[in-house]
Image (cartoon, rainbow, N blue to C red):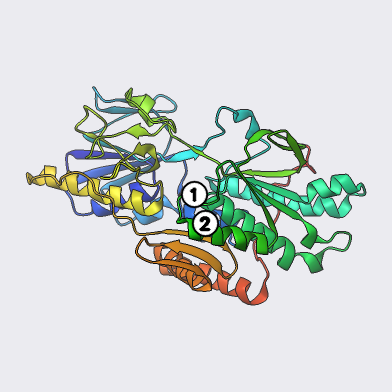
Amino acid sequence: MADHHVVIVGGGFGGLQLANDLKGAPVRITLIDRRNHHLFQPLLYQVATTLLATSEIAWPIRSFFRDRPEVTTLLAEVVGVDSGQHRVTLKGGETIDYDTLVLATGATHAYFGHDEWEPVAPGLKTLEDATTIRRRVLLAFEQAELEKDSAARDALLTFTIVGAGPTGVELAGIIAELARTTLPKEFRNIDTSKARIILVEAGPRILASFDKELSAYAHKALETVGVEVHTGESVTLCTAEGVTMGDKFLPTRTIVWAAGVQASPAAAWLGIAADRNGRAIVDKELRAPGENDVYIIGDTAAVMREDGSPVPGIAPAAKQQGAYVAKRIRAKLSGRAEPGPFVYHHQGSLATIGKSAAIIDFGWLKLKGWIAWWVWGLAHIYFLIGTRWRFAVAWSWLWIYVSRQHSARLITQRETMREE
């Protein structure tokens, strides 16, 4: 067994890429994650909006390494790092020593100082988040079917998404499709097609990271499917009764938060500087400043490109960083010169608005409409892990496209008719 011990904290895209690229290297690896599964987060919103089942976008981490005896997987939570002693501390007090540590602990949703909003406005980062949102969306229609009071019924049939980045736009488009295409024939006392889907963005336009022309196309496409888009408006209060935008109160019983992210506390563990979103500020080799044996990658790290712009917090970026760190570890152990500074290669930005509508920005090529939707779908199927899951997702999408029926409309762990 190799003596050099690599500890990877986080089984997301970056952590898995690193572990995969270290196959055959003279190392032993301990991979630690709070959950037992790897999540294909780009499709998480499709679980939240009844398009896909949880098992189609998440897979047990242990299954990836069953033929890799040098890899040990631990279901545990890291709560601290002692870089002087080369040691991480787990919740419960256990410690694990390392030779090289890689923190790939990701991020969660941020409420800009209003964490009290989380119970009524869940974000979307985990499978639990997705099933919570799915349950609340479906329950809203069920409760509206029973409701006699028109004002209460209207509030139940109003869905508000806060934040118009890719996640918010994708959620709004699919909820609109659900209400207007899938559900109308299934209810008798309500007209689901009259549900209001509200998308609120504090900035001047939706999808701010995309080209203005593509952003404008997405805005129009959302309005075409019935989404009410509010730009330049900030949410100042979220309650179980509704949201306040500026000085306007909107009765709405289902709120989804897609407005910001907050990195894990990795920077605090190491006592190093972080940006305003809590991401650890790393050097050009993705190391914690002053630490030769501690790397930070993915959404946990603030990484700057050569032009001074930040590397986006997306899956391809995390995978590139994981591959880069693997090269550095291999080079160090073999006595070769380690690679120079990390260089991010942008592979394009993608977002879908609904059935047959998407936008893609490759920089040199911009696509919109149904062609972009097909390219978007093929790209996501390609990046799924394993033939079985690629086939399952492709089949689900084909069925939805042909039948207009969302297949994952199960209410599980039922909440008591909005007593939460």
Q: Quadrant of the C terminus?
A: top right
Q: In x, y percent, where is residue 388?
A: 46, 68
Which is more toward the observer, 293 or 260?
A: 260
Q: Kindly identify which numbered label has been placed on residue 215.
A: 2
Task: Quadrant for residue 169, please give it.
Answer: bottom right
x, y percent for residue 75: 43, 40
Tag shown at residue 208: 1
Where is 349 relative to 277, above or below? below
The answer to whether 169 appears left or right of 23 in the picture is right
Which type of secondary structure does the marked residue at label 1 adopt? Answer: loop
Q: Which mark is residue 59?
A: none
Q: Amino acid at mark 1?
A: Ala
* Residue pictured at 21% horizontal, 27% vertical: 290
Q: Residue at x 78, y 54 (%)?
A: 141
- Quarter occupied by residue 29: top left
> Quadrant of the rendered structure where residue 257 is?
top right
Tell me whether circle 2 and circle 1 mark residues in contact (CB < 8 Å): yes
